[in-house]
Image (cartoon, rainbow, N blue to C red):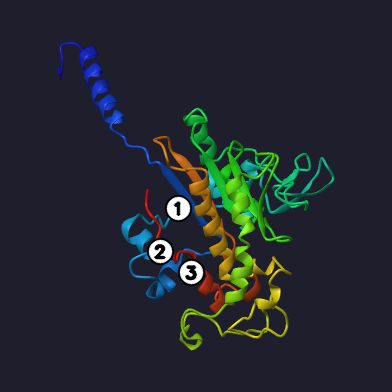
Amino acid sequence: MHLCGNPFYLFLAVFLIFNLQAQKVQRPKLVVGLVVDQMRWDYLYRYADRFAPNGGFKRLVGQGFSCENTMIPYTPTVTACGHTAIYTGTVPAISGITGNNWYDNEQRKEVYCTDDKSVSTVGSTSSLGQMSPRNMLVTTICDELRLATNFKSKVVGVAIKDRGGILPAGHSANAAYWYDNTNGNFITSTFYMNSLPQWAQDFNNKKLVDQYYAQGWNTLYPVNTYEQSTADEKAYESKPFGAAAKGFPYDLKSYTGKNYGVISSTPMGNSLTAEFAKAAVTGEQLGADNITDFLAVSFSSTDYIGHSFGPNSVSKWEKTSTSFSCQPTMV
């Protein structure tokens, strides 16, 4: 069948059409990647009747897309491997992140996934900042974004866990921040910078952790209405607030100014993460220009609570439901 006297003109016309279409693509100013650590996909439906009707999870599912058959077969299903798989699309055998810890045959010792003794802590006097993404052998979507924009995009990772903030943000991130449980501050390492930016120092100086401790932790609904959860107190729970703390409500005032690690096992750990992430958006002016930026946020407290109280506990549901209690703005 003869369609055109000169196939070159047909090719040129098609090229021009696609070129014009490509020019019309509007790039997002800011992409926000959210990981809720130890949240199973079925929680979206199991607890749907108690999610806020106009925001949070229901907004994301109702106004977005739910890809329910997107599975990457890998083991072990721990934080480091999971975050790396999500952001790289590959498995531990390729990424090099084969666990939170693993034994290194060449070094003949156990290695932590983000451990890097060649860098120093920034924002604290502890050693918890000697971390970087150097053990990861592949690039993340954040790295690819930086490459695609000739490193004009800004990429920031935020989490309570160092591995939750570092691994998603990748090798070329402008910054990754994680929580130091010795002083209640968000810190980083010299892999990224030599001193905390002023906005991060200002945030740390607020000591929001102590304010959260003053609030304590009680259930959002009457405790006897949690029909999809186990009983409030079970024998196998690890009692992160002490042996005397036997179920809701939990009084946390005694930890004020003394123990900054307990916050991770409460919903306020995620609230603290969200507040720091919002401060990063403002402080780094993420999304302020027409070059796409990326904010990678991981909510770690769900995992701490799951380990302490169990995956079907009232405590775990409370953390899952409140992870997205804010009203996210889609950009």
- The label on residue 57 is 2
Please state if 228 lies on the left or on the right of 16 as rendered. Answer: right
Instruction: Residue at 38% x, 41% y: name it.
Output: 28
Question: Which of the numbered marks, if any, corresponds to residue 70?
Answer: 1
Q: In which quarter of the image is residue 54?
A: bottom left
- Bin the neighbour count of mark 2 within 10 Å (Cα to Cα): few under 14, some 14-19, many 20 and up: many
**Above or below: residue 153 compared with residue 80:** above
The kind of residue tagged 3 is: Thr
Label 3 vs label 2, nearer the camera: 3
Q: In which quarter of the image is the N terminus?
A: top left
Can you identify the residue that label 3 sits on? 322
The correct choice, above or below, for 78 with respect to 319 in the image is above
User: SS for tag 2?
Assistant: helix
Q: Furthest residue to the right?
A: 108
Quadrant assignment, res 324 = bottom left
As drawn, is 30 to the left or to the right of 120? Answer: left
**Could you tell me if the residues under marks 2 and 1 are in contact, i.e. CB atoms within 8 Å?**
no
Q: Considering depth in this image, is 180 or 210 the residue closer to the camera?
A: 210
Residue in the picture at 70% in, 40% down = 190
Mark sitting earlier along the chain (3/2): 2
Q: Distance between the residues labelled 1 and 3?
A: 25 Å
Nearer the observer, disc 2 or disc 1?
2
Q: Mark 3 and mark 2: span between their CA atoms? A: 10 Å
Residue 192 placement, left or right of 282: right
Considering only order in the chain, which callout, 3 or 1, is on the residue closer to the N terminus?
Answer: 1
